[in-house]
Image (spheres, helix red, strand yellow):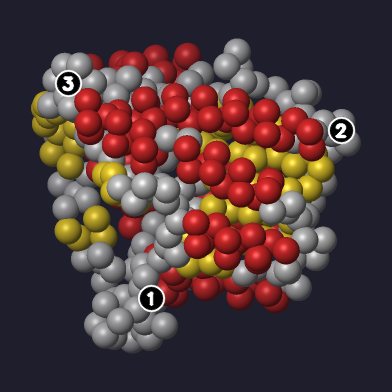
Amino acid sequence: MIIQPKMRGFICTTAHPAGCRQAVAEDVAYVRSQPAMDGPKRVLVIGSSTGYGLACRITAAFGCGAHTVGVCLERPAAGNRTATAGWYNTQAFEDMAGEAGLACPTINGDAYSDEVKAQAIQAVRALPGGQVDLIVYSLAAPKRVHPKTGQSYSSVIKPLGAPFGSKTVDFHTGEVTQVEIAPATPGEAEATVQVMGGEDWLFWMRELLAAGVLADGCCTLSFSYLGPVITHAVYKDGTIGRAKEDLEEKAKEIDKLLAPLGGKSFVSVNKALVTQASAAIPVVPLYISLLYRVMKDRGTHESCIRQMARMFAGRLYPPHHPAGWDWVRTDEAGRIRMDDWEMDPVVQNAVESMWRDVSTENIAAKGDLQGYRDDFYRLFGFGVAGVDYKEDTAQL
């Protein structure tokens, strides 16, 4: 069939297998073009099929020669419906890692469940050495069924305390409008913490520790975002921000768990990028469009793979790095700041200056809306150079 992008709101409901494969191949080629790293050799990535999780899996495998176990929840093709992009990404990664002689089993299921945790532990035990050096927790899901209580929670993206109004853009049409978002109820805020906070990360680490599959000196990593004042009401100071505060609190508990092993947990604050989630957050697409223009002009823009490769090579596993983790450079809250180039005052001042008078009429000139669109469609395998989208394609 001829596969084209089909949109439903801010969601693309189709994915292109050849485009996804080519995008993964380009990320693999980038990592291989960088100096080899003295990094982890056995890695578990929870949330391994897209975004930062996939970038970490690629970086570990092709930059460090690591065997990896991935955990994700993706849907195969059925009838005239394509598989999800994460399904195609994972197929491509497994093929390339397998060709490189690397073990790369993937558990496809609900990472919040005890069953999937048990399956992942068995997969880790089957790796050479039977333990992992690095555990990446990069789970992004709209819902969670609590494994202990069976209660279902759904997250929301809302401000706290009061309504929030600001500019936003429809990245399909380029129309800049004002948006007002009602505040979350206490129940919605708590549900968002349950889905996007750190409890499940803590559950994973407890299970892995009890199973004896954590190597001495292991590291675990999860991700967050802070962003500029422009986005604070809907992100840092909103429901997502509250969930990320919980994530950081759970990181401290994980530190205590890992102390006898000489291990360490980190939260990495990353740069704003186009993701399926960020496309649905009002204000953020407009901010990212302006940010892209400034950072590309300065030569500091990074994709997921470039940012994770920089983090591995420069923050976690630099050449001749000392033993232990006390030397890792963090901020006053103990976070790794991979958003350092984004939050450069020169960059933020330039974005704020454009934000004040950006409109439908000048967004194309001021921002990089086309770059935003290109990155969005690339998430689903569309618009990737070297792929013939007119060709009849098997859905796999």
Label 1 near label 3: C-beta < 8 Å?
A: no
Pointer 3 or 1: first along the chain: 1
Pointer 3 or 2: first along the chain: 3
Pointer 1 or 2: first along the chain: 1
Q: Quadrant of residue 103?
A: bottom right
Q: Is residue 367 above or below residue 127?
A: above
Question: Residue placed at 30% from the left, 47% from the top?
Answer: 151
How far apart in space, not on screen, are marks 1 and 2 (Cα)? Answer: 42 Å
Of residues 239 and 13, the one nearer the viewer is: 239
Q: Position of residue 313 (x, y in %)?
A: 73, 40
Amino acid beneath label 3? Phe
Mark drawn on residue 76: 1
Question: Residue placed at 27% from the left, 20% from the top?
Answer: 233
Query: In the rendered view of the protein, which quadrant contains the C terminus?
Result: bottom left
Q: Position of residue 339 (x, y in %)?
A: 52, 28
**Left or right, 344 with reference to 216:** left
Q: Residues within 10 Å of mark 1 (few under 14, many from 20)?
A: some
**Left or right, 334 with reference to 381:** right
